[in-house]
Amino acid sequence: MKYDEEFLGVRCGVAQHLNAVDWATTPLGPVEAWSLSLKSIVRTTLSSRQPMSFWWGEDLLQFHNDGYAPMLGNRVDHSIGRPFREVWADIWDDLQPFIQTALSGEGTWQENLPLVMKRNGYEEQTYFTFSYSPLHDDDGSIAGILNSVTETTQAVADRKALEEAYRDAQKHLAERGQYEDELKLLNRELAHRMKNTLSMVQAIVSQSLRNATSLTDASAIIAARIQTLAKAQDLLTGMSVTAAEITAITNAALAPHRDGVDRIHVEGPRVYLSAQQALGLSLAVHELATNATKYGALSVPQGRVDITWSHHLGDDFTFDWRESQGPHVAEPTRRGFGSRLTERIVSDLFKGQAKIDFAPDGVAFSLVGKLHQVSDLDH
């Protein structure tokens, strides 16, 4: 860069502002009368490429070099030769402690000091790293303050952006890890559920064929039972990978048997069953409702079915089916797969006791068992 002007023998961009000041009207007097110390610090400051400024005299009149000029904003044309307190009135209170320390003969250092200033006509958050050093006149007295400074506003903003990006990345990695864990759990549960469901379908088909009186009868029974399984699976898929709410499971199994008359009463607290318990109970309710429709309380207009369940402290669970006002009930001479499914399989799934009672006044089914713990729902 070429300069057309110089000040005290130093060519620089701010020379025009230095030359424009009528120094004779200031407390410093004409340039020719300045002390050797003042002239020396002026030459040193103007020659430095490090952004620097200094304030001299009782009023701390400002001097600065080309590197410092951009920090002034729109004050650049009217700051040289004016008092520190006037040039930097908006941040004077923030800087006064550092000024007092330097004027007492002790240097200061401050890193990334936040300052809100109006150097461009509006408030802006800025940051500066700087040192204030005392300046001595020819007689050794402290006559001013030297300011070596670097504006770090953009660096601080970049660091904050980087820290935010790092936090976002860490959050993303954590979410991704959680997602991968959930995906593994889902795959494990789906594989486990598929294996158990296929085993249950195999048992349904083989036992239904073994006990059916004809292929047509077997086909209808198998289709109805597998459809019940499918509905239960749909509910499990819609609610959760590992659990389903008992009211939804029960109502889905009962849906084909409701005739529009309020003859089926369902009551119980909100309870979640594991996938296998939900499938087993769904099949049991289907078998009970099918038999009630064919032979029991739902086969006559006045018949009624009451279904209740309870969940006690811990994992204790009871489920009851009661038929009333139906035909006279007699103990069957042959127990089919449906009865065995309702009693034995449900007993095993709930680790308890399940029993069908063919009482003369109505079939009753009672289950006393345990719910799977939440920690067991994915096993």
Image (cartoon, rainbow, N blue to C red):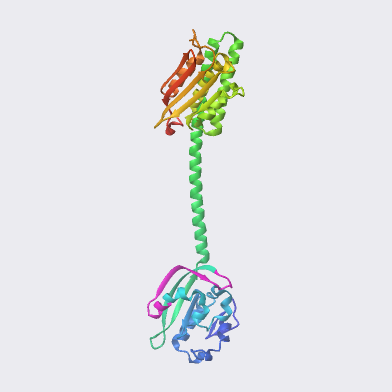
Q: Residue at x 53, y 25 (%)?
A: 265
Relative to 302, is 102 above or below? Answer: below
Where residue 105 appears, x then y in whole percent? 37, 80
* Image position of 158 with respect to 102: above or below: above
Looking at the rendering, which quadrant does residue 73 occupy? bottom right
Q: Nearer the viewer, residue 197 or 36?
A: 197
Residue 7 position within the rendered picture, expressed as x and y whole percent measured from the top left: 54, 85
Q: Nearer the viewer, residue 267 or 274?
A: 267
Q: Report if residue 102 is visible in the image.
A: yes
Residue at the image point whose x is 52% and y is 27% from the top: 266
Q: Is residue 116 magenta?
A: yes
* Segment tinted magenta in the rendering: 99-123
Quarter of the image where the C terminus is located:
top left
> Is 184 in front, or is 377?
377
Image point (54%, 33%), residue name = 239
Expressed as whole percent of the image width and height from the top left, the position of residue 346 reads 46, 21
User: 356 or 325: which is nearer to us?
Assistant: 325
| Residue 141 lies within the magenta run | no
Q: Position of residue 14 (x, y in %)?
A: 56, 80
**Which quadrant of the rendered structure holds the N terminus?**
bottom right
Q: Is residue 198 visible?
A: no
Picture residue at 60% right of the left edge, 15% below the top: 220
